[in-house]
């Protein structure tokens, strides 16, 4: 596979044209009477026309045929995709899932769309307020099928297997330890090369942004220049009656047939694009004296709510770093949170739970449900010598955190058969160390 090229930067106003058609972008206007190369001009709007300039999202696409050139959409089986948050009764328990099982290609061919499984979520698609967390489990490429989501943005986190993603804006190769965002309405198709698994955070009605840095200053966390946008690439490919466009609309799947590949965009310009990011480029901020800084210092992207400082969803990672805090219990502390915390593991072992929480699995701690290090981690960390140490080398855990109270689907609790019924037992060995007659028991030894 030839190395793909990208444009650097987050949220930039960009322009790109396939080098096979130099000058494909119109000069000085968006919608000329006749476009260069007799292309069609089409605008893709990711925000209301009247949004302030700082939040206005749109791109102009110059394509061989407009995307409207398809037959009628018809309802199709939605498989394990849902937005029904009342399938099963609420469950406030700490929940953990073993690695989700990928179907064997020798037994059943499953592509990205067929392999989508909704795990949990909250809110309402029709009012553009909420989110869903999905797991994708697939073993074959999409071929003459593409997908777009009318309901929201998709943040895709591959865990096993790389993804070659064809979009209207060009091609992206996304490997484990990278992420990508396909924004609302963008058509894409995914090629896979082995049995493949990953996580998806879907947000309704808002877009992902870089978090504000506040006292950190101008630099740090995910730097804008490390986000990569595909360059224009087109295929002028006829598929008479045989290309399927799948749309998720109000949580349901619909399909329409067309005669051509949708990836026929010769040139484009704008600030509404797909993009990818390598998690290794995250510039970690951490405590260098004592105690913990809040895990919000590890936020890569945020999808804001209307309440200042409160997110519909944050994407947070726990990357390799140095731990140097003095007089401090260094692993994550015991915690009850007003937010919902879904955690996944891309590779390695999570520092607070060395066993049981495995790559390709996950956990959910709902609002005000207590959680924290298992008993073994607590005992070791309480007695550890507090020398500088490397934390999380060879590991990448992440969190989808939300202000919404998420419900788990029937697939997540039952059908997947991956729920760890013994999760609560990791805290059972915790014992009292209370010394009522000695404030500083270590000094009496």
Image (cartoon, rainbow, N blue to C red):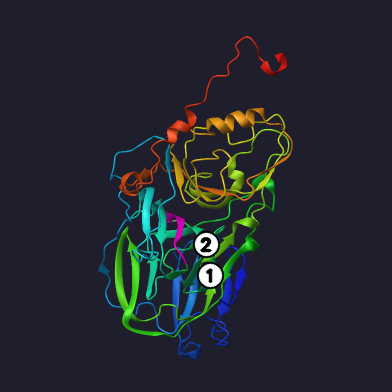
Q: How many marks?
A: 2
Q: Which residues are magenta?
A: 194-205
Q: Image quarter for residue 329?
A: top right
Q: Which mark is residue 63?
A: none
Front-most of 77 and 267?
A: 77
Q: Quadrant of the C terminus?
A: top right
- Please provide percent x and percent y for residue 291: 66, 33
Mark 1–mark 2 distance (CA, rounded to whole Å): 9 Å
Residue 233, compared with residue 345, is above or below; it is below
Q: Earlier in the sequence, mark 1 or mark 2?
A: 1
**Secondary element type, mark 1:** strand
**Magenta includes 203?**
yes
Look at mark 2 in the image and give the residue it sits on: 180
Q: Is residue 269 left or right of residue 130?
A: right
Crowd class of label 2 (few under 14; some 14 to 19; many from 20; radius 10 Å) = many
**Magenta includes 443?**
no
**Secondary element type, mark 2:** strand
Q: Is residue 440 left or right of residue 277?
A: right
Residue pictured at 51% horizontal, 89% vertical: 36
Residue pictured at 63% horizontal, 9% vertical: 437
Crowd class of label 1 (few under 14; some 14 to 19; many from 20; radius 10 Å) = many
Cβ–Cβ below 8 Å for labels 1 and 2?
yes
Front-most of 367 and 438?
A: 438
| Magenta portion: prevailing SS class | strand
Residue 56, compared with residue 293, is above or below; it is below
Q: Is residue 160 left or right of residue 240?
A: right
Look at mark 1 in the image and give the residue it sits on: 172
């Amino acid at each position: 596979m030839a190395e793909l090229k990208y444009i650097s930067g987050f949220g930039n106003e960009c322009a790109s044209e396939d080098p096979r058609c130099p000058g494909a972008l119109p000069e000085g206007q968006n919608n000329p009477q006749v476009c260069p190369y007799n292309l069609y001009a089409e605008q893709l709007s990711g925000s209301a026309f009247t949004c302030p300039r700082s939040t206005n999202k749109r791109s102009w696409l110059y394509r061989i045929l407009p995307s409207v050139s398809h037959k009628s959409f018809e309802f199709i089986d939605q498989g394990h995709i849902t937005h029904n948050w009342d399938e099963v009764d609420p469950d406030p328990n700490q929940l953990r899932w073993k690695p989700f099982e990928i179907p064997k290609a020798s037994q059943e061919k499953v592509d990205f769309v067929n392999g989508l499984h909704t795990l949990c979520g909250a809110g309402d698609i029709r009012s553009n307020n909420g989110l869903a967390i999905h797991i994708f489990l697939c073993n074959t490429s999409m071929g003459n099928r593409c997908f777009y989501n009318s309901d929201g943005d998709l943040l895709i986190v591959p865990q096993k297997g790389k993804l070659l993603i064809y979009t209207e804006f060009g091609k992206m190769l996304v490997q484990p330890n990278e992420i990508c965002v396909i924004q609302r309405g963008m058509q894409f198709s995914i090629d896979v090369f082995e049995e493949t698994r990953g996580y998806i955070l879907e947000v309704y009605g808002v877009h992902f942004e870089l978090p504000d840095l506040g006292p950190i200053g101008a630099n740090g966390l995910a730097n804008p220049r490390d986000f990569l946008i595909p360059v224009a690439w087109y295929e002028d490919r006829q598929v008479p009656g045989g290309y399927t466009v799948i749309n998720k609309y109000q949580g349901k799947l619909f399909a329409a047939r067309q005669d051509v590949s949708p990836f026929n965009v010769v040139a484009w310009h704008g600030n509404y694009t797909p993009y990818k990011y390598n998690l290794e480029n995250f510039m970690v901020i951490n405590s260098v004296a004592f105690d913990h800084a809040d895990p919000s210092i590890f936020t890569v992207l945020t999808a804001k709510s209307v309440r200042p400082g409160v997110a519909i969803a944050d994407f947070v990672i726990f990357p390799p770093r140095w731990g140097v805090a003095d007089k401090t219990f260094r692993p994550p502390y015991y915690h009850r949170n007003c937010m919902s915390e879904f955690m996944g593991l891309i590779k390695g072992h999570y520092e607070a739970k060395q066993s049981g929480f495995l790559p390709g699995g996950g956990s959910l701690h709902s609002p005000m449900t207590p959680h924290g290090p298992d008993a073994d981690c607590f005992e070791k960390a309480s007695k550890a010598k507090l020398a500088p140490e490397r934390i999380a080398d060879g590991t990448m855990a992440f969190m989808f955190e939300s202000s919404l109270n998420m419900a788990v689907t029937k697939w997540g609790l039952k059908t997947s058969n991956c729920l760890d019924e013994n999760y609560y037992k990791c805290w059972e060995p915790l014992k009292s160390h209370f010394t009522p007659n000695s404030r500083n028991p270590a000094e009496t030894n």
